[in-house]
Image (cartoon, rainbow, N blue to C red):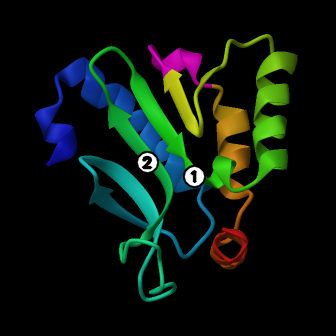
Amino acid sequence: AYLEELPPERREVVASVRDLVNASLPPGYVETMAYGMIAWVVPLARLADTHNGQPLSYVALAAQKNNYALYLACDSMDASADETLRAAYAKAGRKLDMGKSCLRFKRREDLFDEAVARLIGASPVEQTIRRYQASRKRS
């Protein structure tokens, strides 16, 4: 339903990035809708004890008013992953528009597929669960 609600040119971009995410994800994450956007999560069947009782977000994708946003919770859980992503963009001479775990892009070609795919594929579900549980113990 989310894709169908988008204008055709925006639908094409979101569908393409969705395909990239789906092709890059390790097994065990589930695609769903959360917070009004496409999200890939650790399902409650794998991790029921989350801070808000909702599935643990790993990646989310949205078409915003002025850009597209790829929310990379996988990036915010691992400082070295963030550094690797930033270094890959810099080495490729690409401009990175990144907030705290939110990668923004205005055009599909602004997204550096290789670096994003590597980041998304780097954390199997069990590793994500361990990082999340460790972060909760620290806070």
**Which residues are the magenta region?**
105-111
What's under tag 2, amino acid-wise? Ala
- In the displayed structure, would residue 24 be above or below residue 63? below
How many marks can you see? 2
Q: Position of residue 41 (x, y in %)?
A: 46, 66
For residue 92, the mark is none
Q: Is residue 106 magenta?
A: yes
- The residue beneath circle 1 is 73
Residue position for label 2: 60
Q: Residue drawn at (31%, 26%), measured in percent from left and top? A: 64
Q: Nearer the viewer, mark 2 or mark 1?
A: 1
**90 or 17, which is in the foreground?**
90
Query: Is tag 2's residue or tag 1's residue first in the polypeptide sequence?
Result: 2
Locate residue 112, reporting x and y percent.
Answer: 65, 26
| Within-10-Å neighbours for mark 1: few <14, some 14–19, many 20+ | some
Q: Residues within 10 Å of mark 2 (few under 14, many from 20)?
A: many
Query: Compared to 91, does 78 lie above or below?
Result: below
Is residue 76 left or right of 16 when viewed as pictured? right
Q: Quadrant of the C terminus?
A: bottom right
On screen, residue 7 versus residue 116, left or right, reads left
The image quarter in which residue 134 lies = bottom right
Looking at this view, name the residue that lies furthest to the front.
Answer: 139
